[in-house]
Image (cartoon, rainbow, N blue to C red):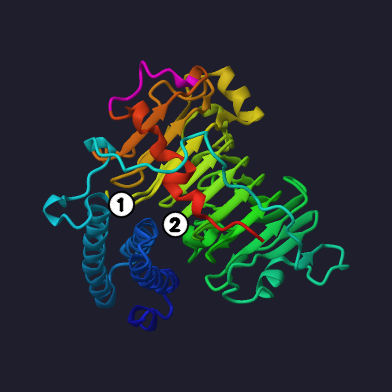
Amino acid sequence: KSILDASAGNLNRTNAAKTCLQLLSYSEHRTNSTDQALTRGKIKDARAWMSAALVYQYDSWSALKYVNGTKEVAETMSFLNGLINVTSNALSMMVSYDNFGDNVASWTPPATERDGFWDKTSGPKVGAGPSLGFPSGLKEDVTVCKNGKCRYQTVQDAVNAAPDNYGARKFVIKINEGVYEETVTVPFEKKNVVFIGDGMGKTVITGSLNAGMPGITTYNTATVGVVGDGFMARDITFQNTAGPDTHQAVAFRSDSDFSLLENCEFLGNQDTLYAHGLRQFYNKCRIQGNVDFIFGNSASVFQDCEILIAPRQLKPEKGENNAVTAQGRVDPAQSTGFVFLNCSITGTDEYMKLYKANPKVHKSYLGRPWKDYSRTVFIGCNLEALINSDGWLPWSGDFSLKTLYYGESKNTGPGSDRSKRVSWSSVIPDEHVDMYSVANFIQGDEWKMSG
């Protein structure tokens, strides 16, 4: 708040301070919720929420890093460093308790798959048991349309009409076919909001905010940004039309715990889908972009999705290095990461023409490590030839190469050949693949999906 008060006339610092205040309020809520989860014996929820608190604290610190230069900013960053350390320690103790119970003598610093440590599994295996899906029989509470015959003509007005803290019941917004040019926010207090469209390419929510604009951060470029827990969407296209030369431009961002998106399309270039925090599930979706276009620090599972790499540059014939993912885990105790199950990784028709004309200059990779403990796995996916034989791309030099975990298991297609993979990627042992099931990784068998 002191930074905000002292930043009149400095647009970038003002917006950074506003973002920090917002994120720290989310951090406070998730920390308080963690206490409640522990008293109920819900250790997985507690780990998920404390992991999110750490996401928000770290991102607050990171936002200020780019506008440092005043006493207020320096003092706040110092405070945040201390807060991050306390949260990290608390999260480590939760992980030890989850694994070793009251036997404190067995508690150890957090380890990762790279260290040979694997979380316990108890739920349905990968590919077995019921998966998450839209509940049947949902009835719309309000309708949005472009022709003026509905009560609401904008999606945001319909969201604003949703009751605050709605409980377990879903508030269903039917969005009729049309192109809705607007920026939509589903705030923290709007829980269990559901968007239902008329199909990919028919119901389209589109925007063009990008990080090249004055005072706009990547977080705030999202065409649709969701914070309220229990968000669901089906049969909608989320789009950011900022061109490939405008850098970060998010089509959809989620901070919604237990968020589920099914048969949705996400279109953009750099940073298309910002899976920022908490637990998320994407089923039968289409995701298109080029640079780090699936990124964030959530625990997200992508199942039966089509991942499409698009041309990157204004002169795409020159070639490029594209990374599909940039997962941002900052602490080994965080229960975050990206899991791709039975997805296809290919290119748009336009990109594939460029690739086939000159495959040596058009290089695409499964991911690169945005932060120290980046974690991404591909299981049972079809990887087309455009995936470079290295598989994975470094971020800068040897940054995080000894601490990340990039795993593959039972993938198919010409891009799945591991004979030339980088040495710092891994094959997931068969006996541990089930750690990444929907039930085990995001507790999907406990989500309350009824209407």
Magenta span: 415-423
Mark sitting on residue 209: none
Q: Report x, y in % for residue 84.
A: 26, 64
Q: Report x, y in % for residue 103.
A: 16, 54
Within the image, what quadrant is residue 122 found in?
A: top left
Image position of 427 with respect to 179: above or below: above
Mark earlier in primary sequence (1, 2): 2
In the picture, the quarter occupied by the C terminus is bottom right
Name the residue tied to disc 1.
330
Mark sitting on residue 278: 2
The answer for how far apart the CA atoms under marks 1 and 2 are is 14 Å
Magenta run includes residue 145: no
Three-letter amino acid code of the residue under disc 1: Val
Closer to viewer: mark 1 or mark 2: 2
Crowding at label 2, few (<14), some or many (≥20) Cα neighbours within 10 Å?
A: many
Label 1 residue SS: loop
Q: Report x, y in % for residue 330.
A: 30, 52
Label 2 residue SS: loop
Crowding at label 1, few (<14), some or many (≥20) Cα neighbours within 10 Å?
A: many
Question: Which residue is painted at 65% across and 54% down in the image?
Answer: 233
As rendered, which of 49 and 368 lies closer to the eye?
A: 49
Question: Which residue is painted at 62% across and 47% down in the image?
Answer: 133
Q: Is residue 246 visible?
A: no
Magenta run includes residue 421: yes
Left or right relative to 251: residue 34: left
Question: Which residue is painted at 38% across and 19% down in the image?
Answer: 418
As rendered, which of 369 and 48 lies closer to the eye?
A: 48
Q: Please, what is the dominant secondary structure of the magenta stretch? A: loop
Q: Is residue 268 visible?
A: yes
Q: Report x, y in % for residue 422.
A: 32, 25
In the picture, the quarter occupied by the N terminus is bottom left
